[in-house]
Amino acid sequence: MNIEGKVIVITGAARGIGEEYARYLASHRARVVLADINDCSNTLDQVKAKGGAAVATRVDVASAASAADMARTALDAYGRIDAIINNAALFGALRGGRFDAISEKDWDAAMAVNVKGIWNCCKAVVPAMRKTGGGSIVNIASLAATYGMPYGLHYTTSKAAVIGLTRGLARELGRDNIRVNAIAPSLVLTEGTREFFAEKADKAIEAIKTGQAIARNLVPADLVGTIHWLVCDASQLVTGQTIAVDGGTVLL
């Protein structure tokens, strides 16, 4: 489970789950590259305050050019890329509702960030992984896809696409010793969750919790163990998998 010295890019690192990944991985002596469309300075300060190694950069994952710049920042700082956690996604900024009430703008935005964004980031980092003999890609899917969350079809569909992308890319990159996996969390208590569900947040949070075998809502720290395993060498023959971290909601 040793990840000391590994260079790990984390998108969506400015807050919430991505911020938690950064703090945790840096505490285990990984070198982290914090990337977000928003300012990552708060996350960077937290990592450095604990003696961690990190650099921060802005990225718009929906732009291939921006994703390429992110990869260059990582390579300029550390000379290699061992793993990427494709965590950046639109969730809180989207409006839920009936499928026929979702705006075309919101639908397109969800696909551009949540699906195309992962494609862009994978294209950006894979050449560096090939040069060093392999790596790990971890895509963040969602219970929304594995369960079939209603009233958020744009988000649900985008996360289902992430699972398909993960499986297909795992088959393509296996010959390069690059493994590609996804995590499908249940609802995680973050700012984005409350933003998405708005006035219905408390009801949604309770309903999802009661549907779990372990009836406790997830917090960001509940995901770091699975992330750690997937980016370390202990999982070197695990690829193409979607791991549900959902308290026992969808039993795959």
Image: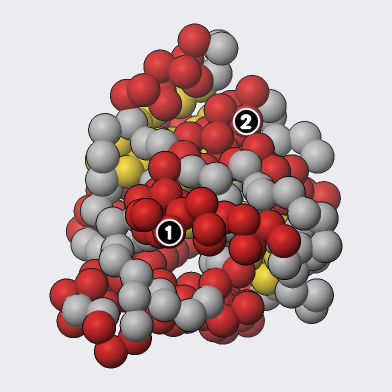
Q: Is tag 1's residue or tag 2's residue first in the polypeptide sequence?
A: 2
Instruction: Please tell me how many numbered marks the rendered image carries.
Output: 2
Image spot of residue 209 (x, y percent): 68, 57
Query: Is residue 47 placed above or below 63 in the rendered structure?
Result: above
Residue 30 position, x and y percent, is: 61, 31
Q: Quadrant of residue 29?
A: top right
What is the x, y in percent for residue 13? 42, 40
Circle 2 Cα neighbour tier, 10 Å, few/some/many (<14 / 14–19 / ≥20): some
- Quadrant including the N terminus: top right
Distance from the alpha carbon under mark 1 to that under mark 2: 31 Å
Foreground pick, 126 / 33:
33
The residue beneath circle 1 is 200
**Nearer mark to the viewer, of 1 and 2:** 1
Mark 1 Cα within 10 Å, few/some/many (few <14, many 20+)? Answer: few
Quadrant assignment for the C terminus: bottom right
Query: Which amino acid type is shown beneath numbered disc 1?
Result: Lys
Q: Residue at x 18, y 81 (%)?
A: 104
Q: Tell me the residue at 41%/77% (across/down).
A: 151
Tell me if 249 is positioned left or right of 113 in this view. Answer: right
Q: Residue furthest bottom?
A: 100
Q: Secondary structure at mark 1?
A: helix
Residue 24's tag is 2
Residue 23 percent location from the top left of the image: 56, 28
